[in-house]
């Protein structure tokens, strides 16, 4: 029996209308991340508002720009050159000036325009425009939070959800954008299988399953998707979040339910911006961030990115037994970097998240914040070392016993040969 294939109903007229009347729709269709969408809309809006001939709403200005660019490609290129030159002038202003622009952020101001024109199939040669960009010589050195600073931030928190967000970010290095659309099914406990391996399957973990940490899916259903790990401290805090969630919603969360909810009545999820704002207010309230001095535009520790910097420093300083390039690749993948040590790693080096756990557990003690959890980890390490020592002694005793038995056997054989 032959299969019946339904043919699509395509309309040339409809395509022409969509292309001519809705350039922003095409622009949005080429952006996967909500965070990128927010940033691109902001910078594109700034550019369109700067052209005095464009009028009306954001949507109307976008249509006017497309119409002008299609009819006047050379003039459009010059317009973009002028805009790049204007941005460059801002980078040369004194740092204390409200118009000052960091040279490192200038290229980001044009990325949205580049994407907008590309999605509307308007070709522009960008080489001469990008040649106007200044040198990136204004990089301010920043550092990650210390453990004591994160403890202080937690001291000012009265929200169990924010406690979890801080502990999870500190122990995984994820960006604050990872909380966008984050659901319960994306975080799963990892069990000690008892033979030096680690698994997600609780059934295979034995009669008394022991959770050592948890995995988290970051940027699910996007091209940037990856797996990372959070500490047992963060996992335990998540259980407190779950208890509150159940009390407020009156049921167990499903795998596709959002973790962070702004209104429990209808289950509305917090946006990434909402979570970021709550974290920023908490950090400022704690007093960890020092006031900016004259001419200083950025804090010594980035607000939320400081937790990511701390993770990277701790993981980079770990000395792994039998250290190899594979450990460096795994560390970069836990960090969300697709390129590990070389560009070929993504194509030729494959590993499961479970293979990264021994390396992660070695660093987990330093990644955790609470002294209680750190001491508990120290005790567990001592127990594991003692168990290994006992096993080594047992194996040594067994080996000595085998040697004695073999020696006695040889003596008996020699005796029989003499007889």
Image (tube, rainbow, N blue to C red):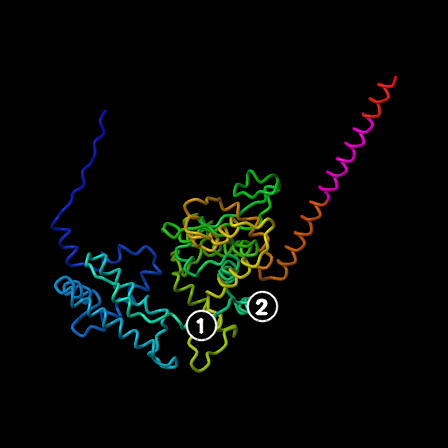
Task: Report the front residue among 393 and 54.
Answer: 393
Q: Is residue 232 left or right of residue 110?
A: right
The disc at residue 326 is none
Residue assigned mark 2: 148
Q: Is residue 264 visible?
A: no
Looking at the rendered image, the quarter that the N terminus falls into is top left
Which structural element holds mark 2?
Answer: helix
Give the residue number, with chain letter if any, for mark 1: 140
Identified at 20% across, 57% down, the residue is: 120
Q: Which residues are magenta?
A: 390-409
> What x and y, as percent, mark residue 158?
52, 66
Are dots 1 and 2 in contact, CB under 8 Å? no
In reply to whether residue 394 is colored magenta, the answer given is: yes
Q: How many marks?
A: 2
- The quadrant of the image that shows the C terminus is top right
Front one among 209 and 264: 209
């Amino acid at each position: 029996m032959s299969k019946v294939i339904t043919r699509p109903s395509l309309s040339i007229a409809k395509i022409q209308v969509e292309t001519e009347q809705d350039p922003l729709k095409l622009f949005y269709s080429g952006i996967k991340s909500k965070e990128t969408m927010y940033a691109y809309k902001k910078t594109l809006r700034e550019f369109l508002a700067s052209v005095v001939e464009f009028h009306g709403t954001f949507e109307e200005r976008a249509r006017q720009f497309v119409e002008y660019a299609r009819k006047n490609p050379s003039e459009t290129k010059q317009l973009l050159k002028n805009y790049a030159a204007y941005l460059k002038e801002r980078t040369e202003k004194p740092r204390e000036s409200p118009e000052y622009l960091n040279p490192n952020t200038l290229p980001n101001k044009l990325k949205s325009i580049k994407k907008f024109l590309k999605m509307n199939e308007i070709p522009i040669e960008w080489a001469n425009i990008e040649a106007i960009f200044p040198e990136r010589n204004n990089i301010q050195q920043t550092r990650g939070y210390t453990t004591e600073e994160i403890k202080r931030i937690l001291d000012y928190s009265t929200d169990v959800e924010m406690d979890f967000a801080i502990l999870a970010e500190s122990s995984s290095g994820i960006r604050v954008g990872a909380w966008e659309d984050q659901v319960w099914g994306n975080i799963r406990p990892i069990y000690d299988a008892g033979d030096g391996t680690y698994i997600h399957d609780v059934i295979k973990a034995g009669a008394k399953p022991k959770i050592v940490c948890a995995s988290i899916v970051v940027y699910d259903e996007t091209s940037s998707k990856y797996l990372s790990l959070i500490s047992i401290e963060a996992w335990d805090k998540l259980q407190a979040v779950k208890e509150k969630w159940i009390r407020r919603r009156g049921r167990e969360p499903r795998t596709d339910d959002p973790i962070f909810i702004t209104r429990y009545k209808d289950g509305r999820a917090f946006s990434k911006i909402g979570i970021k704002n709550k974290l920023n207010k908490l950090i400022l309230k704690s007093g960890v961030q020092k006031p900016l001095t004259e001419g200083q535009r950025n804090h010594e520790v980035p607000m939320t990115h400081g937790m990511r910097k701390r993770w990277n420093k701790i993981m980079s300083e770990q000395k792994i037994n039998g250290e190899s390039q594979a450990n460096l690749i795994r560390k970069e993948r836990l960090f969300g970097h697709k390129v590990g040590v070389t560009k070929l790693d993504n194509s030729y080096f494959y590993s499961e998240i479970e293979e990264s756990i021994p390396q992660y557990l070695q660093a987990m003690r330093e990644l955790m914040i609470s002294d209680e959890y750190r001491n508990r980890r120290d005790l567990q390490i001592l127990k594991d070392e003692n168990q290994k020592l006992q096993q080594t002694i047992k194996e040594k005793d067994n080996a000595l016993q085998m040697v004695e038995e073999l020696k006695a056997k040889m003596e008996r054989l020699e005796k029989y040969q003499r007889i």
